[in-house]
Image: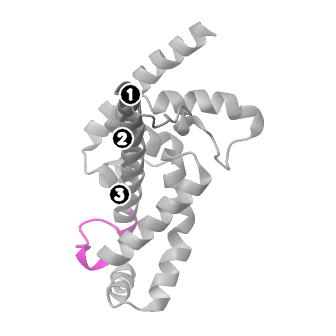
Amino acid sequence: MEEDKFIQDLKDGKPFAYEELIDSYQQKVFATCISFVPNKEDAEDIAQEVFVEVFNSINKFKGNSKLSTWIYRIATNKSLEFIRKRNAKKRFAFLQTIMGNDIPVDKTNYFTEMNHPGILLENKEESETLFRAINQLPESQKVVFTLCKVDDKSYQEVAEITGKSISSIESLMFRAKKNLQKLLENFYKKE
């Protein structure tokens, strides 16, 4: 019942409820964002967008899931939206160069930049390789793998966040592991 009161306080626009929301979820939302976008500044920006979305949409929250699940779903979607926009910009710039326009292409591999605060310097190269492989997975596999293995969520939590069944999560996780195994095998064969 306490969560219901908290949600109602948020819907009523009570400042203390917003403060409590940020205090309770700021680090968790940031951790989810940086799991998808391993750049501290961009993950912070996305986390801010998540809270803006929560504040603007709290009246649409129906209570079909826990508040935390709803917030994680928003964080996951905002992170994926950021990745899609970033990739679209790269594709557009690439097409422009093919067509002969003089827009420079960003040749950096952004999603392996590893400006991730939790990664030690000596593990940086291995982490870059792993994140490069994770980002080559199909989106549904990437989401499930990241939420399970990087964010340490249970299959039940991932099912709630993504709106998929647990058996679907298990299947996606199995395929993600198989695909990562192939991708990493190929990488290490080249070395």
Q: Is residue 63 magenta?
A: yes
Say what amino acid the circle numbered 2 marks.
Answer: Ala
2 or 121: nearer the viewer: 121
Q: Which element is circle 3 on?
A: helix
| Residue tagged 3 | 73
- Check the image and report above or below for 155 versus 127: below
How packed mark 1 is, by other alpha carbons closer than 10 Å (few <14, some 14-19, many 20 or more), is few
Q: How many marks?
A: 3
Say what amino acid the circle numbered 3 marks.
Answer: Arg
- Image position of 75 (left or right of 38): left
Q: Please state, as top left, top right, bottom left or bottom right, where the N terminus lies in the image.
A: bottom left
Which contiguous range is marked in magenta?
58-68
- Check the image and report above or below for 76 versus 57: above
**In x, y percent, where is residue 55?**
37, 77
155 or 188: nearer the viewer: 188
Q: Give the residue drawn at x 37%, y 33%.
A: 96
Say what amino acid the circle numbered 1 marks.
Answer: Gly
Q: Please state, as top left, top right, bottom left or bottom right, where the C terminus lies in the image.
A: top right
Distance from Cα at disc 3 to Cα at disc 1 = 41 Å
Q: Which element is circle 1 on?
A: loop
Mark found first going from the N terminus, 2 or 3: 3
Q: Is residue 97 visible?
A: yes
| Residue tagged 1 | 100
- Image position of 189 (left or right of 74): right
Quadrant for residue 12, please give it.
bottom left
| Residue tagged 2 | 88
How packed mark 3 is, by other alpha carbons closer than 10 Å (few <14, some 14-19, many 20 or more), is many
Q: Is residue 84 magenta?
A: no
- Check the image and report above or below for 11 versus 127: below
108 or 54: nearer the viewer: 108
Q: Are marks 2 and 3 in contact (CB under 8 Å)?
A: no
Distance from Cα at disc 1 to Cα at disc 2 = 18 Å
